[in-house]
Amino acid sequence: MMKKADSKAVKPFLKWAGGKSQLIKEIEAYYPFNQNITKYAEPFVGGGAVLFDILNRYDLSEIYIGDINAELINTYCVIKDNVDRLIDLLSLYQEEYIHLGAEDRKRYYMGKRERFNDLKVNGNATGNIEKAALMIFLNKTCFNGLYRVNRKGLFNVPIGAYKNPLICDEANLRAASEKLGPVTIVCGDYRQSADFIDEHTFAYFDPPYRPLTETAGFTAYTEYCFDDQAQIELAGFAEQMHQKGASVVVSNSDPKSARPEDDFFDNIYVSYKIKRVEATRMINCKSEARGKVRELLISNF
């Protein structure tokens, strides 16, 4: 089942808060793919670092990805189904943007941000390719590559200071399109993966992380909140998938790094194996908050 590394190895096409590129070495130690485990499910796909690592290395029978962020999932679908038109738009944005001075760049950026939010709120399927192109453009040019929305669901990140951003990475987008060809892509709640997950599935859950402090909560990938009750419900769902025979891994923050007495995850995953690992976090509005943080890898095997 293992595929040899090929020349079209894919990397994530978006920078994403909580992205797993820094933890791939830790997570790949859990890959259980063999003659019995031939399927992969990732219902909180985010930037897709683990997904693309698996697509680069294995030839699986079925793959399911999902996310509740409609704009993110639209971008995956457009890359899969309309990569030529997407590349045409991104190439245009790059050509227009790269030659502008600072003030003109800011005006251009704000115009694209306004257009993205208009499509997000008022758009229909005819705008999906443009919306995906705008999503990638904003991600490559906004402050710190951050995706954040306000309570109305509007993208509100200011422009970044990148001098020469690569807005259209054509080779990677084409490779991603090819790799995503057989992948089932779903916009919705993680529970929708239940019918897909069975005893032949490796299921990786990477939900919005539990905040380590009351002021550190960055869960605004969407308008929806993922609080302690939601974490408890996810643990219950993971247990249901365990009962179906799936191989399950869950990522989250380690509350003990801020409060040693905090046993939240130790309690809700009491029958699972919990490993504490160090990750490097590069996306944070405060530079002093970037760097090494401790995270949890929770598994049923």
Image (cartoon, rainbow, N blue to C red):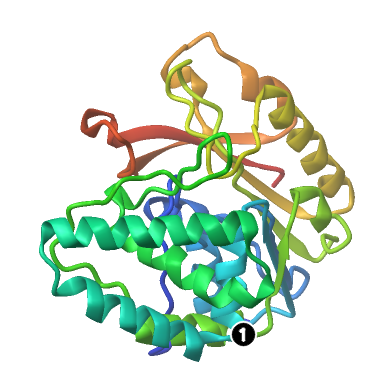
Question: Where is residue 62 drawn, in percent x and y?
Answer: 74, 76
Q: Is residue 22 left or right of residue 41?
A: left
Which residue occupies 68% across, 73% down?
125
- In the rendered image of this protein, does residue 243 appear above or below residue 233? below
Which residue is disc 1 drawn over?
81
| Residue farthest to the left, as pictured | 101
Eyeballing the image, is 44 above or below 105?
Answer: above
The answer, for residue 169, to whether it is visible in the render is: no
**How far from the left and from the top, in percent, is residue 210?**
56, 28
Q: How dense is the environment of label 1, judged by Cα within 10 Å: few (below 14), some, or many (20 and up)?
A: some
Q: Quadrant of residue 270?
A: top right
Percent position (x, y) of residue 101? 10, 64
Percent across and percent down for residue 8 are: 42, 87
Name the one closer to the observer, 252 or 75: 75
Q: Quadrant of the N terminus?
A: bottom right
Q: Secondary structure at mark 1?
A: helix
Q: Residue at x 89, y 60 (%)?
A: 195
Depth check: give the residue in front, 140 or 99. Answer: 99
User: What amino acid is found at the position of numbered circle 1 in the picture?
Assistant: Asp
Q: Up-down: is 28 above or below 277?
A: below
Residue 289 picture quarter: top left
Judge from the rendering whether residue 231 lies leftward or rightward of residue 51; answer left or right: right
